[in-house]
Image (tube, rainbow, N blue to C red):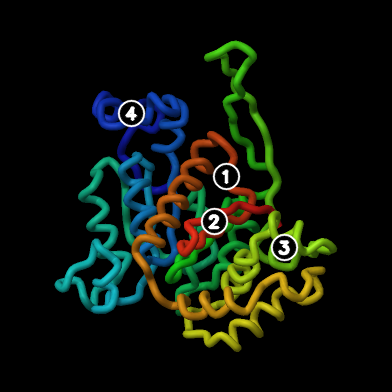
Amino acid sequence: MTMANTRDEDIISKEEVALYDRQIRLWGVEAQTRLRKASICVVGVNTATLEMCKNLVLAGLGGIGLCDPRPIGECDLETQYYFGTEDVGKRKDVVLAERLALLNPLVHIEAASIDGLQWVDKYDLVVAVGNVDGLPAMREINATCRDAGKQFIGADAFGLFGYIFADCLDAHEYVEEVKGADEGDTSRQVLRASYKSLDQSCAASLNITNLKRSLRKYPPLVFICQALALQGDKRVLGETELSDIINQSIQGRGIPDGMVDEALIGRVATSWGTEFVPCASVVGGTLAQEVLKVVTGKDMPVNNWFVYDAIGGDGIQCTI
């Protein structure tokens, strides 16, 4: 762990064993030790951020650096449940760090800066939640992480939709439990997976020839989420503008006309720029699970897209 930490990183205390007893039984001491030594930077504070951070703090992550200098507005009080009327006008990252610290004093939480060139070196993983005005765009943060050899997750939740994108670099190593022939017989298998950057994934050529078969492999929502992830801001988008952005994003990639229908584009355009707590909670909770996979090295993180449609309650993974 690279953030300030006063605990002995290699020894789990009796207090921690008692506090994290259930999850230690679930994933073992080794995974818990990796978790308590890990530090992440979270860029962007919204409802999905709150849900993710709450879960990670309660799980015993070593440290979290929060970066979102925007002031809390009255509209944030409707969905971002850790903020109260007394917080209006204060920085989101500062207030959220204070609230999260109350959940688990063993976790080091601070408001962080991503200015300069070396900020990313302090962390094991960077999570960008949405694109925040005044901060580097998600694709820029991903590029910075790649250059520094750091893993990256991008995510967002808007209205009834959300997505998660993971870039765990070219050779992410993880452990999987493999069932043996006899009941209760398992073995540990060390595996590796290769990931793409956000720019590489959003430019990947798919050369789809069978539309019906491809719809089962690539949910149309993923192409909308790719286009939105590359957007550097959260301005309100009309249906026509969003349609143009998506068409530009998929042009020349072998994705046939009709892959993304206008009705879905209209629903996403209506949702863009809004927050719906139940949907954001699902995305934020799933995001926390993916972070845990990355930092503990237990099970493979999503490779590389997860999209969620709250209308049908569908969460789908695909690789692009």
Of callouts 1 and 2, which one flags the residue occurring earlier in the amino acid sequence? Answer: 2
Residue occupying the point 65% across, 68% down:
223
**Quadrant in the picture for the N terminus:** top left
Indicate left or right for 147 with 72 as reference: right
Residue on which disc 2 sits: 153
Occupied quadrant, residue 260? bottom right
For the residues labelled 3 and 4, the Cα–Cα distance comes to 39 Å
Marks 3, 4: nearer the viewer: 4
Residue occupying the point 55% across, 77% down:
232
Marks 3, 1: nearer the viewer: 1
Residue on which disc 1 sits: 301
SS label for mark 3 = helix
Residue on which disc 4 sits: 22
Asked if labels 1 and 4 touch by Cβ distance under 8 angstroms, the answer is: no
Q: Residue furthest left?
A: 86
For the residues labelled 1 and 2, the Cα–Cα distance comes to 10 Å
Label 1: few (<14), some or many (≥20) within 10 Å? many
Numbered tag placed on residue 200 in the rendering: 3
Residue occupying the point 54% across, 56% down:
153
Vertical placement of residue 212 versus 190, above or below? below
Q: Nearer the viewer, residue 29 or 188?
A: 188
- Indicate the amino acid at tag 3: Gln
- Indicate the amino acid at tag 4: Arg
Q: Could you say where residue 156 lies in the image, as x and y percent from the top left?
A: 48, 65
SS label for mark 2 = strand
Numbered tag placed on residue 203 in the rendering: none
For the residues labelled 3 and 1, the Cα–Cα distance comes to 18 Å
Indicate left or right for 32 with 290 as reference: left
Asked if labels 2 and 1 touch by Cβ distance under 8 angstroms, the answer is: yes
SS label for mark 1 = loop
Q: Could you say where residue 7 lies in the image, as x and y percent from the top left?
A: 32, 35
